[in-house]
Amino acid sequence: MTDLVDNFKGEFKRYKQRNPVPNFSDVIDIEESLSKVSLLTLKVQDHPAVKGLKPVDQWKAYTLDSCPGFIIISNPFEDGGQRYWMEECIKTYPLAPNITNIDSHLSSVDQHDVWRYSKANYSKDITSKDSLMMKLRWVTLGYHYDWDNKKYYTDKHSEFPVDLSSLCKYIASVLGYSSFAPEAAIVNYYHMDSTLAGHTDHSELDHDAPLISISFGQDAIFLIGGLTKETKPEAIMLHSGDICIMSEQSRLVYHAVPRIMKAEMNRIEKCILTCNKCIDSYSEQTNLEHNKKSCDKVTDERTCYNQRKHSCDKHSDFGQFDRQSDSAEKSRETSIDEKLFCDYLNCTRINVNIRQVLKPNERFPDHQNDLSCSVESKKLKLDTN
């Protein structure tokens, strides 16, 4: 029996290499070309408009011809609709009881609020390699994925964010998955030199439910192949706000991120800023004065932080977006916060990958009921060998 040829690894290395810079002409960008993809017709009549998202009849969804079941939705968020989710990923999701890659390295209680600690100790440069924010690589929500055993466990669980669940249920229902139940998520934090090697997501017990993947911040080249690495993958450019769905035949295929790429500045501004109409609406409610200076003219990569941004209640269906300042001190703190927020996003891509773990009415098998039991049984097995 001959070994299968690994055509995935070669493509991964090709797009990862820095010198010489690879040719990106084969990368599929649905904003520039519709080759290799087909427009997907969505059923809009049963899905009324939701605040924070464009009406479904304005969504542009595509299927990848070479990978049935893989769907790309080109940024369905309204202007200002991404901001809330990026702040949740940066400020809220890394908090306990959620689990992060740096938990075991945190020596004080203060450090467990990663954003606040980084803001206080690296206010001049939050992108310093020593900043906790730059060391943060992943957070798990809901059922916490066990990286060592590559499994989920009944007792390794915290409450899944209600607003994120609502967002994902809505997206899934538009695509025909009305019973989708978001039960676990991995939030990945990529920097400009980060990669994610080829892998499959097969640890969930339900492979019929789709995976939903939402991109924020910098661009990424995403590789998607087949059920084995023999299939040569397609390369797709993902922009902030884009949503990928891996369903049906694509649910268990190999995929990877070989390269993070600098997004166009106007695209980053669009995902960070809210529109003036939103700011006006918010101002009327709070009687606060806001700088409405246009960001159309960009003179520096870090220009945006000079403007105070607010999300308004038009997006409040997915959570409390209002963050008011009650004093001059709070206002100054928020202004500094805004600068650091923009600095961080200027070199970061955030990916939120949501999945359903169990089939409806299904329970974990006995060996996945208790993580401690699994660890003990593994030790026992080693001792007897």
Image: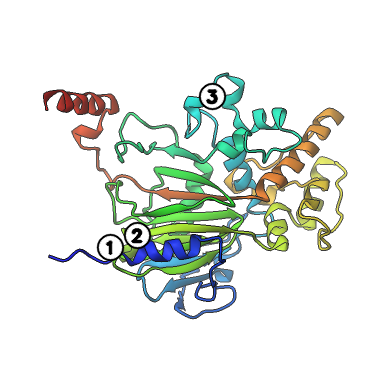
Relative to 22, say whether 344 is above or below. Answer: above
Relative to 125, say whether 384 is above or below. Answer: above
Whole-percent x, y for residue 269 in the image: 72, 57
Task: Kindly identify the amino acid type of the residue bearing the numbered disc 2.
Answer: Tyr
Frontmost residue, 187 versus 129: 129
Distance of mark 1 from mark 3, alpha carbons? 39 Å
Q: Which numbered tag is attached to residue 274?
A: none
Q: Residue 148 appears in which quarter of the rendering?
A: top left
Q: Few, some or many C-alpha atoms within 10 Å of disc 2 (few <14, some 14-19, many ≥20)?
A: many
Distance of mark 1 from mark 2, alpha carbons? 7 Å
Frontmost residue, 128 versus 305: 128
Relative to 175, say whether 306 is above or below. Answer: above
Q: Are marks 1 and 2 in contact (CB under 8 Å)?
A: yes
Looking at the image, is mark 3 or mark 2 earlier in the sequence?
Answer: 3
Q: Few, some or many C-alpha atoms within 10 Å of disc 1 (few <14, some 14-19, many ≥20)?
A: some
Whole-percent x, y for residue 299 in the image: 84, 59
Task: Kindly identify the amino acid type of the residue bearing the numbered disc 3.
Answer: Leu
Relative to 370, say whether 28 is above or below. Answer: below
Looking at the image, is mark 1 or mark 3 earlier in the sequence?
Answer: 3
Q: Residue 66 appears in which quarter of the rendering?
A: bottom left
- Label 2's element? loop
Find disc 3 in the rendering and name its residue.
Answer: 106
Find disc 2 in the rendering and name its residue.
Answer: 254
Task: Kindly identify the amino acid type of the residue bearing the numbered disc 1.
Answer: Thr
Is 240 on the left or on the right of 196, as rendered? right
Distance of mark 3 from mark 2, alpha carbons? 34 Å
Find disc 1 in the rendering and name its residue.
Answer: 228
Is 264 on the left or on the right of 331, as rendered? left
